[in-house]
Image: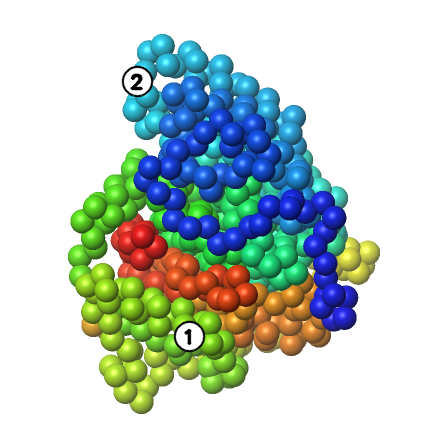
Amino acid sequence: MEQVEQARQPADMPRRRITTPARISESASPSAEHTTDLSMADFRAATAAQWRRAVLTGEVSCVELTTTALTAAATMSGLGAFIHLDPEFALARAEQQDRTLALLKQSMSLDELARSAPLLGLPTAFKDLVSVAGLPLTLGTATSPATLPSSDAPLARTVHQAGAISIGKTQVPEFGLPCYSENQLADPARNPLSISRTAGGSTGGGAVAVAAGILPLAPGSDGGGSVRIPAAACGLVGLKPGRGRIPDDDPSPSVQNLVTSGPIATIAEDAALLFDVMAKQGTKAQSAVQQALDNGVTSLRVGVTTESPFSPDLDISLAEDAVQALENGITILGGLGHHIQGTESCTGPERFWGQNYHQNFQALWTARLGDLTFSDQQAELLEPLTQYFIELARSRPQAATRQSIAVLQEFADDAEDIFGPWDVLMTPMLASAPPPLGWFSAFAPEDNYVEQCRFTPYSSVVNVLGLPAINVPVHNSGDGLSWSVQIIGKRGTEEQLLAIAATMMR
């Protein structure tokens, strides 16, 4: 722990100060200096839609935007956002898009081009759990050499077809299991708001790249909070769609299908742009967000709870700033005309989340790991936490695992029962500040897992239920960190959640 506490800024870090971004004004627009002056190479200078418009009108080219992102990524390599960068790969695609755009502009209007390629020219990157043709895939593990996929995973293909340009692969924990992005392959993902701290996980590298202005937006995946946790840690918006909402994801209604893909962005408008692409639905979310910004959101009944499903098995304690963020969320929503009510007044003596969640979720989270096989040499290279999860899964009686999964499946089947009289629920997001790099892994694996649950006590239950949820930054603490609330919606309300987030951050 001593070397963690003495962590210093890497020598190759940029000198410009990185802070929680303020809301981008409607009058903002990209300018030439943002792609020619390195100190201004920051995609937070305008919205993603404005950057795309600049490409369509010829103010900047796809090659220029890609070069900007690659340069920023290389200059800020000390942040550990990327496991792998491939300038040649990215620039070749950018050049091809510039040529194609020149041809299409002869027969299509700018609005038609924007609809057909909503992410045109925007640099992005997938976490290194997703196959991207031509880019190494490591899964964040040292147990096997990287593979070189010959084709995109379905989601990557969808995002690329919308015009986005991948510049590399972002940092992840081994197999995406922990909520911090550290592994044996590359430098850990450092939080741009405080570089000695974790950026969260497992989409930690993607969140770092967006928070630092290296990328305008990033697709992520969320199996227990892996979009919302790093978004909260880095002061961003992160949306976890409901189970089955993204066409390229596994459509199974099984509670074992925990993972769904979702966007990370600086503002809700950019998250809506990427979500529309991922959901293959035109501009539905963008329209909902714009309507909300113009006219507000219809008054909602908001239930608020601080009870964690991990309680009372784990002692969950909220930092003062986590409480302050929740109070800010209540104040903001109340000021927007929504009706706020604490859930305790409606649940009486009964627990809000039900019994034995901690035990049952641990069984669910580790169940499939017991089927993995590794050689002795590979097993020695596994992270201690991964080894612990595998041993835990193999030692647990199968009947106990099946029982835990059955209980959680019944919980998920009746997911919307938790709303009672409310339209949405609000909880804190993180219970405490992102800890220093290496803090979790300094614990014995069993305690490591428990501390992760204490740090993120409200995220995994949403994956179990298969509901959508969004992380909304609402508070900046005196030490420069960002604090968020989580808004949980009913099935199919992703657009509503994005609209709520947009109005809360206005």
The residue sitting at 26% across, 43% down in the picture is: 290
Q: As drawn, is 429 to the left or to the right of 424?
A: right
Figure check: 397 above or below 189: below
- Seen in the picture, residue 304 relative to 225 is either above or below; the reply is below
Query: Residue 83's x, y, as percent?
Result: 67, 44
Seen at 49% across and 22% down, the residue is 61
Q: Is residue 412 visible?
A: no
Q: Residue at x 46, y 63 (%)?
A: 476
Image disc number at residue 364: none
Q: Residue placed farthest to the right in the image?
A: 377
Residue 36 relative to residue 352: left or right: right
Front residue of this view, candidates 234 and 173: 234
- Residue 389 placement: quadrant: bottom right
Q: CA distance from mark 1 to mark 2?
A: 50 Å
Percent position (x, y) of residue 176?
Answer: 59, 56
Residue that numbered label 2 is attached to: 109
Tell me residue 407's x, y (percent). Answer: 42, 74
- Name the amino acid, label 1: Val
> What's the amino acid at mark 2?
Ser
Report the side of 371 relative to 481 (left or right). right
Percent position (x, y) of residue 155?
A: 47, 40
* Residue 212 in sight: yes
Q: Which mark is residue 323?
A: 1
Task: Choose between 91 and 415: the one closer to the eye.
Answer: 91
Task: Give above or below for 102 relative to 493.
Answer: above
Above or below 452: residue 129: above
Q: Which callout, 1 or 2, points to the residue nearer the camera?
A: 1
Question: Which quarter of the figure has residue 181?
Answer: bottom right
SS at badge 1: helix
Number of residues whose C-alpha sits closer than 10 Å to that of mark 2, classed few (under 14), some (14–19) or many (20 or more)? few
